[in-house]
Structure formats: C-alpha cells, structure tokens
C-alpha cells in the first residue's frame, strides 16, 4: 500500500504586505527584492495564529478528501512556529477538528518539514499501522523575524497548507529521499528563550531567525538537484517523464538553478513565491493545494516534491497523483 493524497487545502492571513510597503518601513526596494528573490508580496498574520491557519487549511483538506475527522488516525503538523512550546500544534488541531482517533504530533524540520511529515506518514501507511493521515505545514514566521534585519525579514510570509493521505493500492508515494546535516546548523537558526532558573545564571536573549543567505543558497542549489536525481533513480523515473517539480518556494533563482542543473524546462517548476514569499514548512502544501484547486493536477501525473531548510535538512519525493 502507498500513501496517496486525496484532499488538499490552504489558508493565508488576510493582511497583504507588498514590497512597496516594506520599502516604506525599511531601507529596501521592490526592485532589490524582486530581482534577488522573485517575491512581490507576502501575507502576514495579525489576528491569525499558526494554529488558526493550520485549522483552516486542514478543514478544507478534509472537506475535499471526503473523509470525516474521526477517520484520521495520524495527524502531523510540520512547523517551527508553534504558538505553544507544549502542547504541540497537532494536538490543538486534533481538538479543533474532533479527530478523536488520531495520534497527533509536530515535526520540526523547517522548510523541509512537510517532506519529513510525508516521509513519516508514508512509512506508517506502508507498514499498515495507520490508514488515513492528515499532514499540515503551518507557519507564522513573521513572529520570529528581526524586522530590523532587511536581509531576512523581506523573504518570509505566513500561511498553512494541508493534505489528507490514505492507503491506496495504486499511485501515491513511489519513492522518497530525505537527509540532514546537523554540522551546518549555524547557517540558519533561531536561538534563545529567556531562562528564569535558580541554578542557571545565564539568561539567553530572545532570539530571531538568523541566516547566512549565501551559504543556504549554495547548499540549496547543490543538494536539491542531487536529492531529486537520487529519488528519480529510486523511482526508476526519467526526469523527462515528471509532470511537475514542486520545490520549496525560497527563492526564484534557486528554483531556476535547479531546473537548469536537471536540464528540465522551467515551466514544469510551478511557483507562487511572487504571491506568498517563503512560508517555510507551509510552502509545498500551499503550492500543491493551489494547483489542485486550479485543476492543474490530473490522475496519473508524476510529481516530484522537494524541500530544504534549517537543520540543515532536505528531502524529495516522487508521487503519482
Ligand atoms: N534590500 C536591499 N538591499 C539588501 C537587502 C534588502 N532587503 N538585503 C540585503 N541587501 C544588501 C546587502 O546589504 C548587500 O549590500 P552590500 O553589497 O552593500 O554589502 C547586498 O544587498 C547584497 O547582499 P547579499 O546577501 O550578498 O545578497 P544575495 O544576492 O546573496 O541575496 C538572499 C540574498 C536573497 C538572501 C540569497 O542569499 C538567498 O536567497 N539565500 C537563500 C535563502 C533561503 O533559501 N533560505 C531558505 C531556507 S529558510 C528556512 O529554512 C526557514
């Protein structure tokens, strides 16, 4: 049995901030952001939370799958911006949906989070332990950003995407390849939490997301093509037969570079980065759900999904729609 996606949903905050707006609050410009990244605007949470965005996307994914919440037996949220340290976002979504039979937990793998969640769900479904899974990527990165650091804060947006998977005899996940390199964790991190502890004199300052943009860029353009080539080999699928390559939406130039290295036309690398910016773990499921809603995915299509991010973490998956 394979894990097959049978429903998708997405949710974005109401507030839109375009590059022109950012140029009124910091030393940046629409031209710099668009040329370096492909981003034109992002959605930022005001009233919304990671939990509310995740719940919105999950409800739409469930409705489009035809399953009821009680039929879900595995619920995973990929996020690095949980509203609470504990409980997990997944447990709060379980309560909101009434997914009473689900085991619920979060995974923390930054922008590769949805791929990691898919990896876990596919293993559980293949082994027969669980049958129906709800996977959500949800982030409010705007709350982790240093809004005085123009080199990071212009890159990110908030949002959530979700997918319902079920055990299927045909189609679904064909092959996966995921990896981590913790030795390079400092390239992208968010440190700190204030410690009030009688035995520990240190008080860590509350942290913001910090990134060595060029190091992450080089890591992405080298690792993502290798990871995709490996997963295509596992699936015994030539790149030419892939309908779409859905990549984590971090930077348009990274996606173009991967297309070039794989020698595949850019029009098979759909993008929504201009509209949504980098929504970390939410980026792949939002893109997938939007394409599904637009009727761009058809039974039998071969999709490659690939994500990369803090950790460092990366992953790719081949699935038949
Ligand atoms: N507006 C205007 N100028 C800026 C801005 C800005 N927002 N940000 C930086 N600059 C300036 C810099 O100060 C620098 O100026 P200087 O030459 O006078 O020193 C100049 O622009 C060039 O800066 P670089 O950092 O060299 O720009 P680069 O071409 O490397 O682009 C970027 C930066 C867009 C961040 C790129 O490195 C990148 O996309 N990296 C990958 C990021 C990524 O993919 N992250 C994904 C993982 S996220 C996750 O896992 C949560």
Image: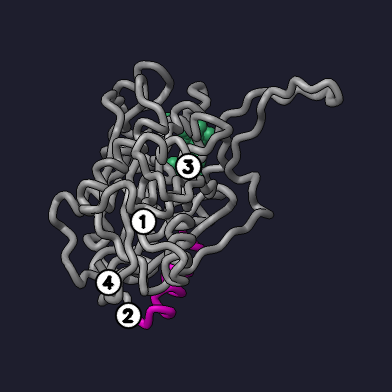
Residue 89, given in percent of the width and then of the height, sits at 47, 37
Residue 228 drawn in magenta: yes
Secondary structure state at the residue bearing disc 1 = strand
Q: Residue at x 52, y 43 (%)?
A: 213
Where does label 3 land, which residue? 79
Furthest residue to the bottom?
236
Furthest residue to the right?
199
Q: Are marks 1 and 3 in contact (CB under 8 Å)?
A: no
Binning the other alpha carbons within 10 Å of mark 2 as few (below 14), some (14 to 19) or many (20 upward) gives few
Where does label 4 land, which residue? 242
Q: Are marks 3 and 4 in contact (CB under 8 Å)?
A: no
Between 152 and 11, the one nearer to me in the picture: 11
Which is more foreground, mark 1 or mark 3?
Answer: 3
Write down the region rendered in magenta: 221-237
Instruction: Mark 3 and ligand 1: say if the CB distance to the nearest ligand atom is below 8 Å.
Output: no
Of the residues under marks 2 and 3, which one precedes in the sequence?
3
Between the residue at mark 3 and the residue at mark 4, the CA separation in whole angstroms equals: 28 Å
Where does label 1 land, which residue? 247
Q: Main secondary structure of the magenta part?
A: helix
Q: Quadrant of residue 320?
A: bottom left
Between 169 and 69, the one nearer to me in the picture: 69
Between the residue at mark 1 and the residue at mark 2, the CA separation in whole angstroms equals: 18 Å
Residue 287, compared with residue 238, is above or below; it is: above
Q: Quadrant of residue 209?
A: top right
Instruction: Mark 4 and ligand 1: say if the CB distance to the nearest ligand atom is below 8 Å.
Output: no
Where does label 2 land, which residue? 238
Q: Is residue 9 left or right of residue 278?
A: left
Between the residue at mark 1 and the residue at mark 3, the CA separation in whole angstroms equals: 17 Å
Q: Residue at x 46, y 46 (%)?
A: 78
Residue 126, compared with residue 269, is above or below; it is: below
Residue 300 drawn in magenta: no
Of the residues under marks 3 and 4, which one precedes in the sequence?
3
């Amino acid at each position: 049995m394979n894990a097959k996606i049978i429903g998708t949903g997405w949710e974005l905050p109401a507030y839109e901030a375009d590059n022109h707006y950012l140029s009124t609050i910091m030393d940046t410009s629409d031209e710099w952001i668009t040329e370096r990244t492909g981003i034109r605007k992002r959605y930022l949470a005001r009233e919304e939370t990671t939990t509310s965005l995740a719940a919105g996307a999950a409800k739409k994914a469930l409705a489009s799958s035809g399953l009821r919440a009680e039929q879900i037996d595995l619920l995973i949220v990929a996020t690095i911006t949980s509203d609470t340290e504990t409980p997990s976002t997944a447990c709060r979504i379980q309560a909101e949906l009434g997914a009473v039979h689900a085991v619920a937990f979060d995974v923390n793998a930054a922008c590769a989070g949805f791929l990691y969640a898919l990896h876990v769900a596919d293993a559980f479904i293949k082994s027969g332990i669980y049958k129906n899974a709800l996977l959500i990527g949800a982030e409010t990165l705007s709350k982790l950003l240093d809004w005085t650091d123009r080199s990071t804060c212009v890159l990110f947006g908030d949002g959530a995407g979700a997918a319902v998977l079920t055990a299927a005899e045909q189609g679904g996940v064909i092959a996966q390849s995921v990896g981590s390199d913790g030795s390079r964790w400092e390239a992208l991190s968010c440190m700190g939490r204030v410690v009030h502890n009688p035995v520990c004199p240190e008080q860590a300052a509350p942290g913001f997301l910090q990134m060595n943009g060029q190091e992450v860029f080089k890591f992405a353009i080298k690792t993502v093509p290798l990871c995709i080539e490996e997963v295509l080999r596992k699936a015994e699928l030539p790149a030419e037969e892939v309908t779409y390559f859905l990549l984590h939406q971090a930077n348009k130039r990274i996606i173009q570079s991967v297309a070039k290295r794989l020698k595949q036309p850019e029009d098979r690398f759909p993008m929504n980065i201009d509209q949504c910016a980098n929504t970390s773990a939410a980026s792949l499921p939002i893109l997938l759900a939007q394409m599904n809603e637009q009727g761009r995915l058809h039974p039998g299509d071969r999709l490659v999904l690939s994500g990369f991010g803090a950790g460092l973490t990366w992953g790719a998956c081949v699935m038949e729609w």
